[in-house]
Each structure stands twice: as C-alpha cells, then as structure tokens.
C-alpha cells in the first residue's frame, strides 16, 4: 500500500500499543508454564502472531476470552515430539532468536523459516555455540534446521550483535537439569532488553542471577509457573508520537510507565536533549529502535546530531542506517551515514518527497511523522509494513488529524 500524506499537524491523545518486546516474553513464559496463565493487553501484530503461532507448534494452546486478554495453556515439561517441529517466524527476529534454544530444550530442535529479511539476519553466535556442543546447525535456501540436545554449561556470547541471543538462552536454560551461565565476551548492548527478559521470567517464578563483574547471568534449573500478567504500553512506539510533538503537533501520550524496564523510555530524556539547540552525540547502543524517530527530530532543529554505536541498526528489518539516511534525504534532509554512525544536520523544515518504506515498520512510521511538518506532500511506499508491530498506526494517525490517501 502506497500512500500520499498532506502535511497536517496532529492533535489529541494517544495511548501507544502494548510493548511488543514484553508481549513476546510474557507469551513465551506463559507457554512454558505448567498450567493456565492469563495475559492482558495483548494486541495482535504480525510479530506477536508469529510468537503465538510458534508457541502453539511447541504444544501450548491459547484462547481469547475477551478482546485484549488471552488465556495460555502452557506445556510444562511433559510434551513429546515425534518429528522436529516447524516454526514459521514471520519477520520477527525476536521470535526466531528466542525460539531456537527453547525448541532445542523442549523438542530437541526445530525447522525454522521466515519472511522478508529475517533469515538473512545474523545467527552466527548461536551457530558457533551450538556446533561446539555437537548440535547440528544447517541453513539452506532460507530454511534453518537445528537438531540436538541442549546441555547445561557455560555459554559465551558476543555482547554486540544482538541481545536476543541472551534472551533466548535465558529462557531455555532453566529447562535443563543442571545450572548454566550465559556470559558476554564484550560489553552487552541493548542490556535493558535482557532486564525485560528477567522481569518476564520473574513473573513466571524464575529468578536469574546477574554475575557481578562477570558480564553474565547464572540460571538454575526451575519450572515456569502459571501467572497473571499485563503488558504495559510500548515506549519504542511512543517515540514516534514524541517525534510528532517535537515537530509541533500537540499530541498527548498517555498510559506509559515512567518506571518501565523498557530501555526505550530513554526517548523522554533524549527529546529534551534535542529540544535545546546545539550539536549532540547520542549513543544508541542501548536503544537501537529509537534511531528512526530520533533522526526525524534531529533533522528539524538547530545543530548537528551524531548517533554513535549504531552498527547493529544494519541488522534489523532493513539496514536502518542506510534506510533512515535515505528517508531523510528523500525529504530534503542532510544526513551522512558512517559504518557505525549517522550524522544528521538540522534545518528549519523538511521539504517532502517520496520515501521507500523499505519493508520496515519503523521507517514507515518515522516518515509519516516527519510528513506532519514537511513543506510539501510525502509519498510513502509500502506503508503496510506497520503491521509488523503497530497495525493501528495509520488509524490512530488519521484520528489525530493526519491527512493521507491511498495511491
Ligand atoms: O529483545 C527484544 O525484544 C529486542 C531487542 C532489540 O534487538 P537487539 O538486541 O538485536 O538490538 C530490538 O532492536 C528489537 O526490536 C527487540
Ligand atoms: C528489530 C525489530 O524487531 P525484531 O528484531 O524482533 O524483528 C523491531 O521491532 O524494530
């Protein structure tokens, strides 16, 4: 779906959708529990549907007694598999990377497929670890087959590729019959995502101990217990509405937890850092998903913003350093892409133009928000990419006064 947006300010109140990251985690913890858990504020998006689908393949069941609430019948420890289960992970990196170790622990492995760029996104840290353990790892024509026995022990991962490898192992290791540790060979980036994993596991009765000074975590054998949980509002999605505010739209953002474990709540303070004129350097290693909306803010202000420690942005739904730069350049902005950075030169106003959404929800949402304050109209190609994480985005955008039509 291609759309043309006519610049218009947005007015009104918005509650961001439930945190996608927390929803993945609570669904997984509930699906591994021995019993029935109730989860509130679950809103379907392609990524959340992927996790629900994959946990069903593992033997969990769920029903929705009312909209927004699901009851998950977890698998406990008793499920047996005749064949290797097959998981369609959609385009969700979280689903794929969380599920690989879990499938090894629960089912002796699995066959994983995905769409878009998913199967090209790096899995090397897992491949290396699991091959060392004698687990077979084969990826051919976009199909990954992993088979073997996950053993307790010490797992050493690089900390700068994706925190999702840590999360996947932390979820799986309590299911083994002896203690394990997950250690990092480098400083751990996106660390708050691991904190969120520990928080979800805690809700299911599992505590993970951080190893002080060792950049790692200790996991003891434990059973996931059923629980009642609710997903809080998503700070990563709130960032687009923060960007709308920054560009002059008085949008009131409601329902966010200011004490959230979500690292992307950093947008609240970064907003104010950018609101004052002058040059800035912003480290996005802990909040990679904020880069597209922050770059939109950086493009319409006085001064230059250099986003650093950003190489991991190249490993998302699109190469987000390249696609964020291309989006702003298409709108008349001045941006320089470095190997590990993005430098955005501020200016009074963006002009408008045609943006390739690059099949990336965060690029589409960033472009739509930038359009609210452009001098001329903005065409966004492939706007349907928002279904990955925020299917309602354009409905909300329109309700706030955003003006667009489908081409
Ligand atoms: O664990 C998670 O829920 C996520 C971790 C982050 O990925 P990396 O750790 O790969 O940066 C983030 O970009 C992604 O959108 C969601
Ligand atoms: C990178 C993202 O998600 P995932 O890694 O789960 O595909 C995202 O939502 O921006």
Image (cartoon, rainbow, N blue to C red):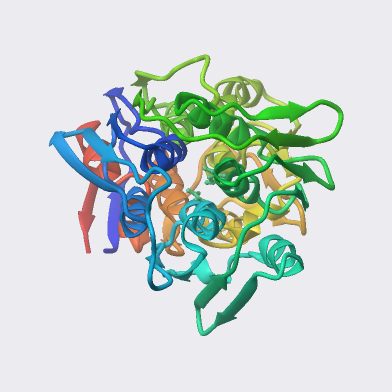
- Residue 203 or residue 248, whichever sits in front: 203
Residue at the extreme top: 259
Q: Residue at x 76, y 57 (%)?
A: 338
Q: From the viewer's perspective, is 80 left or right of 123?
A: left
In this rendering, position of residue 141 left or right of residue 341: left
Against 193, is 121 above or below?
A: below
In the visual, does 42 lie left or right of 355?
left
- Foreground pick, 74 / 129: 74
Image vertical order of residue 202 relative to residue 156, above or below: above
* Residue 322 higher or lower than 60, as above or below: below
Q: Position of residue 16 (x, y in %)?
A: 35, 30
Q: Residue at x 31, y 49 (%)?
A: 60
The quadrant where residue 399 appears:
top left
Quarter of the figure with the C terminus: bottom left
| Relative vertical location of residue 185 with respect to residue 104 in this rendering, above or below | above
* Among the 4 quarters of the image, the one containing residue 295: top right
The residue depicted at 69 percent of the width and 49 percent of the height is 152
Position of 112 with respect to 196 (left or right) is: left
Q: Looking at the image, which residue sits at the far left? A: 66
The residue drawn where x is 60% and y is 22% is 275
Q: Residue furthest bottom?
A: 141
Q: Position of residue 277 (x, y in %)?
A: 68, 24
Q: Is residue 150 visible?
A: yes
Quadrant of image for the N terminus: bottom left
Report the number of numbered marks.
0
Instruction: Give coordinates of residue 132: x percent, y percent.
Output: 76, 67
Give the x, y percent position of residue 344.
67, 45
Residue 377 appears in the figure: no
Write down the quadrant of residue 276 in the picture.
top right
């Amino acid at each position: 779906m291609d759309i043309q947006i006519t610049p218009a300010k947005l007015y009104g109140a918005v509650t961001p959708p439930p945190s996608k990251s927390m929803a993945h985690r609570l669904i997984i913890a509930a699906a591994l529990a021995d019993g029935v858990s109730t989860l509130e504020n679950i809103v379907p998006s392609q990524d959340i549907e992927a996790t629900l689908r994959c946990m069903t393949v593992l033997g969990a069941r769920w029903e929705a007694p009312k909209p927004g609430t699901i009851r998950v019948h977890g698998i406990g420890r008793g499920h047996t598999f005749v064949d290797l289960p097959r998981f369609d992970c959609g385009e969700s990196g979280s689903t794929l990377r969380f599920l690989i170790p879990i499938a090894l622990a629960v089912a002796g492995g699995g066959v994983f497929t995905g769409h878009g760029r998913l199967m090209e996104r790096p899995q090397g840290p897992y491949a290396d670890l699991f091959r060392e353990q004698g687990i077979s790892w084969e990826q051919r024509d976009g199909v990954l087959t992993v088979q073997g026995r996950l053993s307790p022990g010490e797992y050493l991962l690089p900390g700068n590729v994706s925190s999702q490898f840590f999360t996947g192992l932390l979820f799986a290791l309590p299911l083994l019959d002896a203690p394990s540790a997950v250690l990092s060979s480098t400083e751990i980036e996106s660390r708050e995502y691991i904190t969120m994993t520990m928080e979800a596991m805690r809700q299911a009765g599992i505590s993970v101990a951080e190893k002080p000074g060792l950049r790692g975590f200790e996991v003891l054998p434990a059973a996931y217990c059923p629980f009642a949980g609710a997903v809080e509002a998503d700070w990563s999605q709130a960032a687009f509405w923060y960007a709308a505010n920054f560009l002059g739209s008085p949008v009131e953002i409601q329902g966010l937890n200011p004490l959230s474990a979500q690292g992307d709540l950093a947008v609240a303070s970064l907003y104010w850092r950018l609101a004052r004129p002058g040059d800035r350097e912003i480290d996005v290693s802990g909040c990679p998903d904020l880069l597209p909306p922050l770059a939109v803010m950086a493009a319409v202000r006085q001064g230059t913003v250099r986003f650093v420690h950003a190489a991991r942005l190249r490993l998302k739904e699109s190469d987000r350093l390249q696609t964020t730069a291309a989006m702003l350049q298409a709108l008349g902005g001045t941006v320089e892409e470095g190997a590990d950075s993005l430098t955005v030169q501020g200016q009074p106003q963006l002009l408008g133009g045609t943006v390739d959404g690059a099949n990336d929800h965060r690029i589409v949402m960033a472009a739509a928000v930038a359009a609210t304050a452009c001098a001329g109209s903005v065409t966004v190609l492939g706007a349907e990419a928002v279904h990955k994480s925020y299917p309602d985005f354009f409905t909300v955008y329109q309700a706030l006064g955003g003006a667009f039509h489908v081409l």
